[in-house]
Image (cartoon, rainbow, N blue to C red):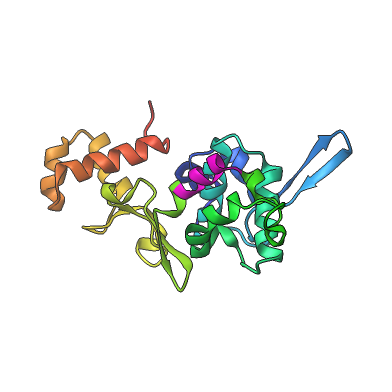
Amino acid sequence: MYTAAEVARWAQTSPQTARRWIAGYTFTSTAGRRWSPPVTSKRADEPFLSFADLVEVAAVAAVRRSGLSMAKIRAAVDFLTSELKIERPLLSQRMLSDGRELFIRDAATAPHYTNLSRFGQVGFSHLEDVLREIDYEQELAAKWWPAGRDAQVLVDPRVNFGRPIIATIGVRTETLVDRFIAGLKVGEIAEQYGTDPVIVEEAVRFENRSGAIAA
């Protein structure tokens, strides 16, 4: 169970933006007031977000960083859901294995796929940055390595209540960072938890990247 603020930190977006994607929002266009539906499947009566919601927000945030509009992201997701019957496609392993081909097909040569090339290779390359750091089970997202696999920071909804941990020792990254903020040196923390100082540095870097450490 995650809060919108936590999801925003780990997905590297603002809490305000994350909440808009989670709850949906209205906006003004040349056609008047419009409604942009949520990008997650969270129900309004659910107080917290799930691991699936976290991954979807992280995926959308990555693509938005490429400069792609929400309209194009939503069009691609809607097509994959309705036409190819991929439920929650941003969680599906098919996006990683089939996505590049889908997004470069053109309506003129493969009308069955519509013109998903509008999504753009730049957009897909940013999405791939998130998807390739996910472990899948039965073709659905099951674990996420938000800082890359080498950093050993893991989000597994079945371990430690889904908090980011160091995979090799099972300790929360925030626990290691609390020791660091308290004044312990990286080497001391590593010795205390039986790990490599580089891993402690990765935990500090991850928490600092997500804004958990005050500047």
Quadrant where the C terminus is found in the figure: top left
Nearest the viewer among 36 and 191 is 36
How many marks on residues? 0
Residue span colored magenta: 120-128
Q: Residue at x 70, y 62 (%)?
A: 112
The extreme top residue here reads 215
Q: Is residue 117 left or right of residue 125?
A: right
Q: Can residue 15 be found in the magenta stretch?
A: no
Q: Is residue 177 above or below residue 76?
A: above
Q: Residue at x 55, y 36 (%)?
A: 66
Q: Is residue 148 left or right of residue 199?
A: right
Q: Residue at x 17, y 36 (%)?
A: 184
Q: Is residue 122 above or below residue 51?
A: above
Q: Quadrant of the rendered structure where residue 56 is?
A: bottom right
Magenta residues, dominant SS class: helix
Q: Quadrant of the rendered structure where residue 185 is?
A: top left
Nearest the viewer among 116 and 131 is 116
The extreme bottom residue here reads 138
| Residue 52, position as x, y percentages in the image | 53, 61
The extreme front residue here reads 109
The answer to whether residue 74 of the structure is visible from this angle is: yes
Q: Is residue 156 left or right of residue 75?
A: left
Q: Can residue 125 be found in the magenta stretch?
A: yes
| Residue 162, position as x, y percentages in the image | 41, 60
| Residue 207, position as x, y percentages in the image | 36, 40
The answer to whether residue 50 of the structure is visible from this angle is: no
